[in-house]
Structures are given as structure tokens and as C-alpha cells.
Image: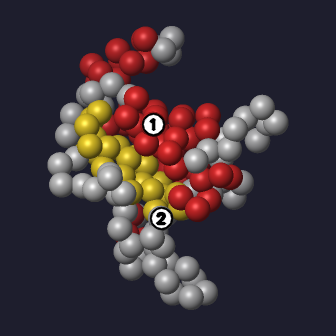
Amino acid sequence: MSRAARRARVEDVHEIALGMPHVEIAEGTTAERPVYQVGRRSFVFFRTPRPDAFDPETGERYADVIVFWVASEADKQAMVLDESTPYFTTPHFNGHPSVLLRASRIGELSRDEVAEVVQDAWLARASKRRAQAWLAEHGQG
């Protein structure tokens, strides 16, 4: 991480996700564990503790897992196999285009890195029209 880059915080995930166009928080989710959606399709969500994500030493379930959609299995593998990142997956997510991140490790990433992951998650789930419009607006289309 460069000296100028600020370490990411969980609040950044919320801010960036809500800043994307056409985003809603899924009905029935809580402020502590929101599910961010575009066109009723989830792209980032905060999981409840589940048996598939746990501390290998204590067996305690992780209570701070954030799920980000990715565009492809190749993208997922690139992220989880890169040992320099805190991203991971579990057998429960085999074949699912998403990566996991513990909130307690988010500071290992810069805010810009988290912004890119949230934006890519949104792009992976938004309609083609919305994605193309966002990319064009941001000089990427």
C-alpha cells in the first residue's frame, strides 16, 4: 500500500456501495448486516456467522464476513489465490462467483482497493445497460 493510500474501513464498504447508482438495501436486512442490491440482485452483503467460515484454531464462527460478487471464476481465483490479499472462500462458495473478506482484515487493503472491489461487484450484478452507462460515465466504456 502506498504512503498516500488510506487504509480501508468497513464504513467505506457501506459508503461506496450506497454511492453506486440504483442501489437499494434488501428488504428485511438489518443495518448491522445489510445486503446491497442493484436491480434486486445482491452484489455485497454482510453474512451472519455460518459453519463454513470459522477460526481453524478455536472453531469459532467468523462473525464479520463480507461477501463481494465477482465477474468470473477466474477473477475469484486470482483474488483468493493471491496470498498478498486477505480475500478467501469456503467450500460453501465453490462455483459461486464471489469472494469473502473478514471485516477485521479490511485494513490490509486501501480504500481505493475496496472501492474497486465494490464497483466490480456492482458491475457484475447490474444490468448490461446500467453497467455500460456507469462505465461510460467513468471513462471506461
Q: Examine the rendered structure and indicate whether residue 24 appears above or below residue 27.
A: above
The percent position of residue 130, horizontal first and vertical second, equals 29, 21
Instruction: Identify which amino acid the numbered label 2 is placed on.
Output: Asp
Describe the element under mark 1 as helix, strand or loop. helix
Q: Quadrant of the N terminus?
A: top right
Residue at 27% in and 27% down: 22
Q: Position of residue 77 (x, y in %)?
A: 54, 53
Q: Residue 46 is drawn in which quadrant?
A: bottom left
How far from the left and from the top, in percent, is residue 32? 36, 57
Please indicate, yes or no, whether residue 70 appears anywhere in the rendered image: no
Q: Residue at x 27, y 19 (%)?
A: 129
Q: CA distance from mark 2 to mark 1?
A: 17 Å
Q: Which residue is mark 1?
A: 15
Q: Residue drawn 45% across and 56% down? A: 66
The residue positioned 36% from the left and 52% from the top of the image is 45
Which element type, helix, strand or loop, lies under badge 2?
loop
Other residues around mark 1 within 10 Å, as few (<14) / some (14–19) / many (≥20): few
Judge from the rendering whether residue 117 lies leftward or rightward of residue 92; answer left or right.
right
* Up/down of 8 relative to 102, above or below: above
Q: Which mark is residue 38?
A: none
Tag 2: Cα neighbours inside 10 Å, few (<14), some, or many (≥20)?
A: some
Q: Which residue is mark 2?
A: 64
